Image (spheres, coloured by chain):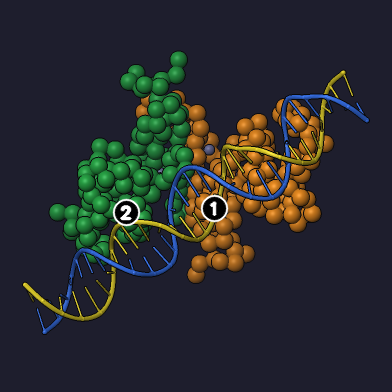
Chain colours: A green, B orange, C blue, D yellow
Amino acid sequence: METNNLKKAGLKVTLPRMKILEILETSETRHLSAEAIYRELLDSGEEIGLATVYRVLTQFEAAGLVCRLHLEGNQAVFELERGGHHDHIVCNQCGRVEEFFDETIERRQSEVAQQHGFSIKDHALVLYGDCLDSACPYRPA
Amino acid sequence: METNNLKKAGLKVTLPRMKILEILETSETRHLSAEAIYRELLDSGEEIGLATVYRVLTQFEAAGLVCRLHLEGNQAVFELERGGHHDHIVCNQCGRVEEFFDETIERRQSEVAQQHGFSIKDHALVLYGDCLDSACPYRPA
DNA sequence: GTTCAGATGATTAAGATTCTCATTTCTATT
DNA sequence: AATAGAAATGAGAATCTTAATCATCTGAAC
Ligand SMILES: [Mn+2]
Ligand SMILES: [Mn+2]
Ligand SMILES: [Zn+2]
Ligand SMILES: [Zn+2]
């Protein structure tokens, strides 16, 4: 049960927190904006305020349950923390988001930072391009 | 003279555009927010509106004269386009920004994108860490 | 110098996120 | 199960950054 994750994170178990966690766990889209989560809550009949969604997501982030990403536009998206770090590729045409992890890039980042006298703690990497998937509805000519 | 850059970019030569370009060229800080540029204009006695600063920067970006970056916080920063692409390292403590270019990272990005069926067009990479510079006023213990 | 498209500045508006505070809900304790 | 206290919530206001409006001004061309 997900109430455990909340308790382990030191967060009181409340209905909004459980519902938001449930959406993050079960939604077919892995990367969700606060607005998107809010809409899903409304659709499922929950009376949870948008302010609460933002508040809870920020708490989840601080607790290490989710991570916050800026992929495109001006809205942050959130995704459940599932152990492994990864970076993202976003399709400029259809908005599809793919995940990847590249050992070489990760290693070089550390080396480059070190060469510049930095102890690297984090990084943000997003690739933008056109997906060549034949199913992409906005595929360029 | 910088009026040439404006003409080449197809932009009418106006006082606000010249002044903003001048600040981007001469400021000791390479990465400036719209607000920071606005303040420098005020300090030098220019009566240029903040809306104009945002408008002009957006035009400069479209013309390829500057590029817009999101390094930290919620404010975009702008820097003069000086030919070569590069990425950034930001110090979590003092905010210092260093630039780097790594051929290996760039190459792997293309390869990774290709493997995932994307034609890569752009990317955003920012490393965050603590600078180990003895001059850093916020150096961690 | 006149003309007029285009640029500017003051203001308003928009979008995303956070804050405030009165009310409600958990959790622990009787 | 009732109670109490701390914490969380919801509605709306506030904030912050950036973009849009629109009347006025400016610069390039004649
Ligand atoms: Mn992801
Ligand atoms: Mn730079
Ligand atoms: Zn990575
Ligand atoms: Zn790069």
Q: Which mark is residue A49?
A: 2
Residue B125 spot, x, y in % from top left: 49, 42
Which quadrant of the figure has residue A86? top left
User: In this rendering, which labeled residue sits more in front, label 2 or label 1?
Assistant: 2
Q: Is residue B34 visible?
A: yes
Residue displayed at 54% across by 39% down: B102
* Residue occupied by mark 1: B90
Residue A78 spot, x, y in % from top left: 35, 47
Is B38 left or right of A137, judged from the image as shown? right
Identify the amino acid type marked 1. Val
Is A136 left or right of A119, judged from the image as shown? left
Disc 1 sits on a residue from what chain? B
Front one among C9 and B100? C9
For mark 2, give the secondary structure.
loop
For mark 1, give the secondary structure.
strand
Work out which quarter of the rendered image holds the N terminus of chain B and state it.
Answer: top right
Q: Residues within 10 Å of mark 1 (few under 14, many from 20)?
A: many
Q: What is the total number of numbered labels drawn onto the structure image?
A: 2
Q: Which mark is residue A116?
A: none
Is the residue indicated by label 2 positioned so its CB lies within 8 Å of ligand 1?
A: no
Q: Is residue B113 visible?
A: no
Is A98 left or right of A11, judged from the image as shown? right
> Marks 1 and 2: in contact by CB < 8 Å?
no
Which quadrant of the figure has residue B10? top right
Residue displayed at 36% across by 28% down: B116
Front one among D18 and A94? D18
Disc 2 sits on a residue from what chain? A
